[in-house]
Structures are given as structure tokens and as C-alpha cells.
Image (cartoon, helix red, strand yellow):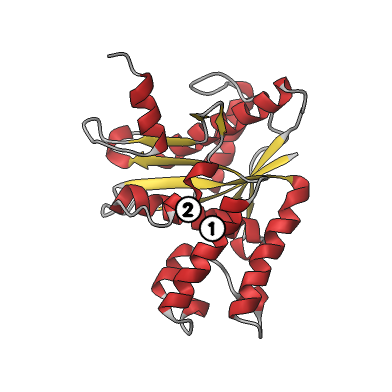
Amino acid sequence: MHILYLDDSGSVANAQDDYVVLAGIAVFERQSHWFSKELENLANSIWPDNPRNLEFRGTDILTGKRHWRGVGKDDRTKAYRDALQVIASSKHARLFGAAVHKASVSPNDPMEFAFEQICNRFDRFLGHLHKSGDTQRGIVVLDESSYETSLQSLARDFGTKGHTWGQIYNFAEVPLFVNSRATRLIQYADLIAHATRRKFERGDNDLFDIFAHKFDSVGGVVHGLYHRKPQDAECACPFCRQRRSTSPV
């Protein structure tokens, strides 16, 4: 089974946020322990007295909040980059993400729009595995959020009514919601989502570029990243570059 851990960044209700992002990391079930151990080792190097209590959340790391308050800025930045590098250097991680410009999908809910995009793309990834002889089911695990009820309902509908592009065929269960403190993999998802929103909200590529090559792709075609931007906006992200190159002249 492949498990997709997701977290969100940005607020649907906050008018100051132009974008919301839903993003995370998909790993085979036997790989989750290895990823957790790598982040645990990093936590131990930063706070050896109580590493399990050190939670990796992008906003806290960069602003020095909560348990990161006593860690110097350079060390915090290095910890963030080191955690992302674990993903970037792994042969077993595939990333999925959707960055949605809120006004561009109004009056629809941008987070539900992002969730539908990601579920479709994760299902297609599982379908590609099946066609290659590696039949696997998938499950989505998300950080606890106010979207728990609506996203669970939306996912149930995928299995019966379908979604914009068809039906979901390869999910083993409706999404599960967990506390981010309970699993390091959700913390990876937080770092990915946070860094992805910094790119699309602020044009800050520094962290995003570390892992951009890990978004799911087949034959050089990027399937794991989706960007819904304002109609006339220019963008050089992998998804938008690809879409321009395949658009008719």
C-alpha cells in the first residue's frame, strides 16, 4: 500500500492569503519508518534532551516559535533544508501538491478544489503502477483540520459519484485525519506545503527548489503538481512550463 500524507498551508478565510496549498509526500508503507527515523535523528541533533517533542512545522521553524524559539536562525534554516533534503535524495518519495489561487476558483471552495486535484493525481499514480504489474492500493492521511468533515464526504463521493475527471479506483479507504505530533510523515507534509506556498504566494523558490524534482512524473511529464493561477499571470513552475509547451500555438 502507498500512503499519501498531506497538509495544507494558507487560509481560505484569510483575505491576505491569495493562495491555499495542499501538498505532501507519498511513500510505500514499509518506507514510512525510515523517513520517520531520519527526522527523529535530525530532531535529536537539535534538541537531544527531548527530541520527540520537537515538531517540524515550517512556520514555527522560520519564525522561531514554540520549541524552535531557543534555536538560532541559521540552525533553524539549516534544519528545514536538511529535512527537505531527506526527501530530495530519496528514491522512494513521490510528492503531490496543488497550489490554488483562491479568486480564480471562486465561488468554489479552493481547498476542496485542491483536494480533488490531488486525489485524482494520486489515483492516476496508483493506476500507472497497476499497469506496470505492481498493483497497490492507496490511502490519504491528513493533518487534523477544519476541513475534516467536508473532505471525508468529498472522498466518499469520489468512490460512488466520481469527480470531474472520472472515478477513483485505487483507494483502500476514505481519508484518515491525525494529529501532526503523532507522525513525522505529516510533519514532512507540512514542510512541503509551507515551502510550496512560499513559492506561489511570495515568489520564494529557495526551499521549493530543493524538492521540486520529486513531484510525481511519468516519462518527463509532471503529474504530481497542479497550479491554478490567475488567467493572465506568468509562471515558470514545472506544471505551468509543461502546460505551455503542450498548448497549441
Instruction: Say the numbered circle drawn on residue 84.
Output: 1
**Contact, CB < 8 Å: mark 1 with mark 2?**
yes
What quarter of the picture does the N terminus occupy? Answer: top right
Please provide percent x and percent y for residue 17.
30, 52
Q: Residue at x 26, y 35 (%)?
A: 230
Q: Earlier in the sequence, mark 1 or mark 2?
A: 1
Q: Residue at x 50, y 43 (%)?
A: 213
Amino acid on which disc 1 is placed:
Leu
Relative depth, front residue between 170 and 224: 224
Image quadrant where residue 107 sits = top left
Residue 73 placement, left or right of 123? left
Element assignment for label 2? helix
Q: CA separation, marks 1 and 2?
A: 7 Å
Please provide percent x and percent y for residue 14.
31, 54
Q: Can residue 106 be spotted in the picture? A: no
Vertical relation: 70 (above or below) 12: below
Please provide percent x and percent y for residue 166.
55, 18
Vertical relation: 139 (above or below) 32: above
Amino acid on which disc 2 is placed:
Ile
Q: Residue at x 42, y 46 (%)?
A: 21
Q: Which residue is mark 2?
A: 210
Relative depth, front residue between 207 and 198: 207
Classify 10 Å Cα crowding around label 2: few (below 14), some (14-19), many (20 and above).
Answer: some
Element assignment for label 1? helix
What quarter of the picture does the C terminus occupy? Answer: top left
Residue furthest left in the image: 232
